[in-house]
Amino acid sequence: MKIRRLTQEAYSRLEKFPQILKKEDRYYGLLQIEYNGFVFAIPFRSNLNHKYGFKTILSGKSWCGLDYSKSIVIKPSDLQDTQFKLRDNTEYEKVKNNLGKITLKFGQYIDMYILAVNTGEDLHNICKFSTLQYFHKELGISN
């Protein structure tokens, strides 16, 4: 299981996209997942307040977890070599123990996103804030 940060070069290439997660001097830990021949990076978030993700731990009144809606298509070289350490080992263990489920649910999210774009029927409102909108060419979406 690879949890890494993006390289500075990758952030520089992607910073033009407003939905890409980056806070000044703070980079997100990303879980690398392969699906349908693509490599994705799914960010860990400390305030996951929607259903398009995998919730890991409750921190105060907010859920932490993996945010599928902010995933990006990457090349493996876009990730730093050094493992990213999560704040809470419980979160790491939960992800590790549910990696199969995460991969399955993430794949369903990708398929649902592609269907919504291709049909123009965004019934679940997954397209508006998704970072996948910047990777239509890579995902084979013609819109």
Image (tube, grey):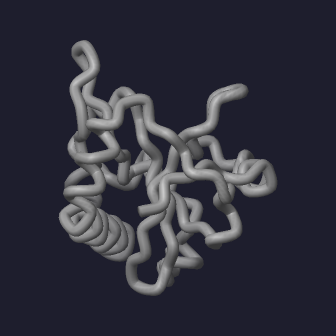
Q: Position of residue 3 (x, y in %)?
A: 49, 53
Give the tally of numbered discs: 0
Residue 57 lies in what quarter of the image?
A: top left
Side of 92 where 21 appears, left or right = right
Asked whether residue 121 is in view, the answer is: no
Locate the N terminus and report the quarter of the image it occupies: bottom left
Asked whether residue 119 is in view, the answer is: yes
Side of 102 where 14 appears, left or right = right
**Which residue is located at x 43 percent, y 75 percent?**
34
Q: Position of residue 11 (x, y in %)?
A: 72, 49
Q: Position of residue 31 (x, y in %)?
A: 45, 56
Q: Residue furthest top?
A: 60
Q: Nearer the viewer, residue 7 or 22?
A: 7
Q: Nearer the viewer, residue 96 or 42?
A: 96
Q: Is residue 107 above or below residue 69?
A: below
Side of 55 where 114 appears, left or right = right
Q: Position of residue 123 (x, y in %)?
A: 21, 56
Residue 79 lies in what quarter of the image?
A: bottom right
**Which residue is located at x 56 percent, y 78 percent?**
138
**Which residue is located at x 58 percent, y 45 percent?**
20
**Which residue is located at x 28 percent, y 20 percent?**
59
Q: Is residue 2 above or below residue 64?
A: below
